[in-house]
Image (cartoon, helix red, strand yellow):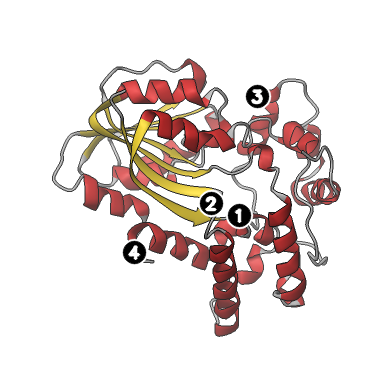
Amino acid sequence: MRIITSDDIIETFFKIYQRGLLYFFSKFTLVSTKRTKSTFNKIEIESSNWWIIPKIRERWNKIISGDNTESYEHYIVEKYFFSKENLKLLSLGSGVCSHEIQFATYKNFIEIRCVDFSEKILAEAEKKAKEKKLSNMIFECTNINNIQLLDNYYDAVLFHSSLHHFKNIDLLLDKVKKTLAHDGLLIINEYVGSSRLQLKKAQIKEINRILKFEIPRNYKKRFKINITKNKVSGPGLLRMIITDPSEAIESNRIIPYIHDRFNIVEEKKLGGNLAMLLFKDIAHNFLIEDLKTNTLLNRIFYLEDQFIKNSNSDFVFGIYKANQL
C-alpha cells in the first residue's frame, strides 16, 4: 500500500480550491464519523467524476439490461417483480435516495425504507419524495451497525454504492440474509475493488498510458482549473483515512462474503478499473455527445473491456438469493 502519493498533494490543492478552507479544516478531527459526514453532507458540490458522463450511464444500462436507455430499477421491476404486489424494499446507506425514489414510483412497492447516517441528505431525499407525492417511503437516520431488522420481512435489500463504506461486512450481510423474505433479493451496484482504493500497479500503468497516448490535450483539462491531467499515481492510504475513513474500508471482501451467504442470480461486470481514476477531474470534458467524443469514449470502453476480460471488475451489479447453508 502507498502511504502518500503525488495525487494526494494535487487532490488536497484541488479540494481547497473547489470546496474552500472550511471543508479542508473539517478533516482535522479525531472523530472519524465527523470526517465522513463532512464528505457526504456537501450534496450541493459540483464534481467531475466518471459517473456524470452520459455515455458511462448508458454503458451501465446496456451491460445490466441489454438496453442503454433502460435503468436497472426498471429492469429489476420488470424481470423480478412485475406480477408482485405489497413489496417491501430496504436500502442501507441510501444517500439522497435517487434510486430508491425511482423504485417507489412503481405501485408494486408499499414500503421503501431508506436508512443513512446523514440527516442533511435524508432531509433532501424526503423533500424530493414529497414533491413527487410518494407515500410509500420511510426515511431513517441511524448508524447502520446498530440497526434492528425483522426476520423474513423484506422482499429486497439494496446497496447502491454504499456497501463498500461499511466495516464488518460479514456481520451486516448476516443481518441482511435473515431479514430477507423467502425468495427475497439482495441487490448491489457496488465498488468491489481494492480496499482503500489502493489500485494495482497494472491499473495505474494502463491509465497513464491512455492519458499519454490516447486522450487529446483538450480533453485533459482539470475541473475548474487551467491545468491538464497528464499522470496519476492513485490515492495514498493516509489521505483515504483522513478524508473519509469509511471509503472502501473492506471493499475487496464484498464479493467473497456475498458468495459465502448467497447464490448468484445474476452478476455483471461494470468495469471502472480504468475509467474511475482516468476520468476523475476531467469527466466534464466528455459531456458533449459529438462524433469525436463518442469515438474517444468507445475506444476507452474497448480498452477497459480488454483489461478486465480475464480479471475481476472493480464495479459489479449483482442480484442474489440467500443460500440455505
Label 3 secondary element: helix
Please give the name of the residue rendered at 70% of the width and 59% of the height, measured from the top-left corner: 281
Q: Is residue 65 left or right of residue 166?
A: left
Mark 2 and mark 1: Cα distance apart in space: 6 Å
Question: If you read the primary sequence from the N terminus, does the residue marked by circle 2 or circle 1 appear first?
Answer: 1
Percent coordinates x, y for residue 276 in the rendering? 62, 55
Mark 2 and mark 3: Cα distance apart in space: 29 Å
Q: Are marks 4 and 1 in contact (CB under 8 Å)?
A: no
Q: Is residue 324 left or right of residue 295?
A: left
Q: Quadrant of the N terminus?
A: top right
Between disc 3 and disc 1, the foreground one is 1
Please give the name of the residue rendered at 22% of the width and 52% of the height, measured from the top-left corner: 78
Q: Are marks 2 and 1 in contact (CB under 8 Å)?
A: yes
Which residue is identified by label 1?
A: 273
Label 4 secondary element: loop
Between disc 4 and disc 3, the foreground one is 4
Label 1 secondary element: loop
Looking at the rendered structure, the kind of residue marked 2 is Ser
Question: If you read the primary sequence from the N terminus, does the residue marked by circle 4 or circle 3 appear first?
Answer: 3
Looking at the rendered structure, the kind of residue marked 3 is Thr
Which residue is identified by label 4?
A: 66
Mark 4 and mark 2: Cα distance apart in space: 18 Å
Which residue is identified by label 2?
A: 313
Between disc 2 and disc 3, the foreground one is 2
Front residue (pair 91, 254):
254
